Image (cartoon, rainbow, N blue to C red):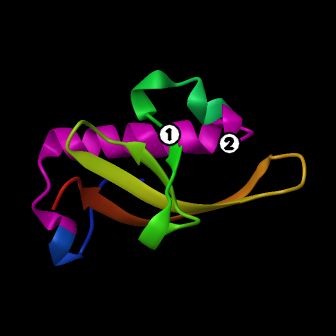
């Protein structure tokens, strides 16, 4: 992962957000189970409700969220995680 994109929406993200994004993605890749994300307090892991029902979210920082879909198996072990958006919170 290089932290580079051709998507105009994300091209102007501050460098510290890009570094933190990479760190958060590495956390997600490293955990075996979704419950393990709860133990990393800085992520503030949550399952979204309402319009975003079925979406998982973790903090990149206090302003940006990483939204993703997870596919755990019956034991809760993450099989796939599809990252689909970096959301600027409250916008």
Label 1 secondary element: loop
Residue found at x 50% / y 39%: 45
Q: Is residue 30 above or below residue 41?
A: below
Q: Is residue 8 above or below residue 28?
A: below
Residue found at x 15% / y 66%: 11
Residue receiving disc 2: 34
Q: Is residue 49 left or right of residue 29?
A: left
Q: Is residue 88 above or below residue 24?
A: below
In the displayed orientation, state which residue is furthest to the bottom.
Answer: 7
Q: Is residue 51 left or right of residue 2?
A: right
In the displayed orientation, state which residue is furthest to the right.
Answer: 74
Q: Which residues are magenta?
A: 10-35
Where residue 59 sits in the image (x, y, percent)?
Answer: 36, 41
Label 2 secondary element: loop
Res 62 quadrant in image? top left
Res 21 quadrant in image? top left
Q: CA distance from mark 2 to mark 1?
A: 9 Å
Q: Nearer the viewer, residue 87 or 51?
A: 51
Residue receiving disc 1: 45
Q: Is residue 53 above or below residue 41?
A: below
Q: Are marks 2 and 1 in contact (CB under 8 Å)?
A: yes
Where residue 23 sits in the image (x, y, percent)?
Answer: 40, 37
Residue found at x 60% / y 44%: 29
Q: Is residue 89 left or right of residue 50?
A: left
Q: Residues within 10 Å of mark 1 (few under 14, many from 20)?
A: many
Q: In the image, is residue 68 part of the stretch drawn in magenta?
A: no
Residue found at x 59% / y 65%: 54
Q: Main secondary structure of the magenta part?
A: helix
């Amino acid at each position: 992962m290089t932290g580079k994109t051709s998507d105009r929406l994300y091209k102007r993200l501050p460098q510290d957000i890009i570094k933190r994004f990479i760190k958060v993605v590495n956390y997600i890749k490293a955990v075996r189970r979704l419950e393990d994300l709860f133990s990393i307090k800085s992520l503030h892991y949550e399952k979204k409700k309402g319009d975003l029902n079925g979406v998982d979210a973790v903090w990149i920082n206090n302003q940006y969220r990483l939204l993703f879909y997870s596919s755990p198996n019956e034991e809760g072990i993450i099989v796939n995680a599809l990252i689909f958006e970096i959301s600027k919170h409250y916008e």
